[in-house]
């Protein structure tokens, strides 16, 4: 399952809550979730349990009071499984190469890690960092936002 990160600039004045509506673009109806304002600018919310690689319609509506929500803006988004990876080169002699796909992209990246060096990346966990070198250790960490 994947998480979709919803980030937006809140209106002024900031409402006390939002209605987040989402659905697969092929589904007829939305799932609605009421969430309190975080007070952050930008506001940040996560929708979990989605299918990676599937397009979703997402709409955020501001609470106006009295049970009324403002019209929202609809966007299409595609959730990805993004995870932090710590990549260490345990060799004290040679530089080693590692390959990964940065989260939010489809381009494979190659990074060279110097002897006893370390690199932390937010990568797509469906194509985690990889290498053929036994001196490279790759440790998955927490979910991350691209």
Image (cartoon, rainbow, N blue to C red):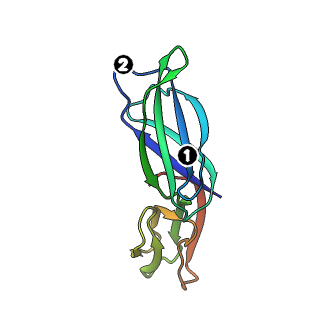
N-terminal-most mark, 2 or 1: 2
> What x and y, as percent, mark residue 92?
48, 76
Quadrant where the C terminus sits is bottom left
Is residue 24 rendered to the left or right of residue 111? right
Outermost residue, top side = 66
User: Could you say which is closer to the camera, residue 134 or residue 74?
Assistant: 74
Is residue 124 rendered to the left or right of residue 104? right
Q: Are marks 2 and 1 in contact (CB under 8 Å)?
A: no
**Residue for point 40% across, 22% down:** 14
Q: Is residue 46 above or below residue 120?
A: above
Q: Name the residue tied to disc 1.
A: 22
Outermost residue, bottom side = 132
Q: State the SS at label 1.
A: strand
Outermost residue, front side = 28
**Residue for point 53% across, 73% down:** 90
Q: State the SS at label 2.
A: loop
Q: Name the residue tied to disc 2.
A: 13
Cα separation between marks 2 and 1: 24 Å
User: Could you say which is closer to the camera, residue 73 or residue 138?
Assistant: 73
> What x and y, as percent, mark residue 59?
47, 41
> What x and y, as percent, mark residue 29?
60, 47
């Amino acid at each position: 399952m994947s998480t979709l990160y919803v980030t937006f600039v809140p209106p002024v004045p900031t409402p006390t809550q939002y209605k987040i509506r989402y659905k697969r673009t092929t589904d007829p109806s939305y799932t609605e979730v009421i969430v309190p304002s975080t007070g952050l600018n930008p506001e940040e919310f996560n929708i979990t349990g989605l299918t990676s690689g599937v397009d979703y319609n997402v709409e955020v509506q501001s609470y106006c009071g009295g049970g009324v929500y403002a019209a929202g803006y609809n966007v299409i988004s595609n959730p990805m499984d993004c995870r932090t990876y710590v990549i260490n080169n345990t060799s004290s002699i040679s530089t080693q190469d590692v390959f990964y796909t940065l989260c939010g992209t489809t381009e494979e990246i190659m990074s060279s890690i110097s002897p006893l060096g370390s690199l932390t990346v937010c990568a797509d966990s469906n194509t985690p960092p990889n290498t053929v070198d036994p001196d490279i250790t790759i440790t998955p960490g927490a979910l991350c936002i691209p």
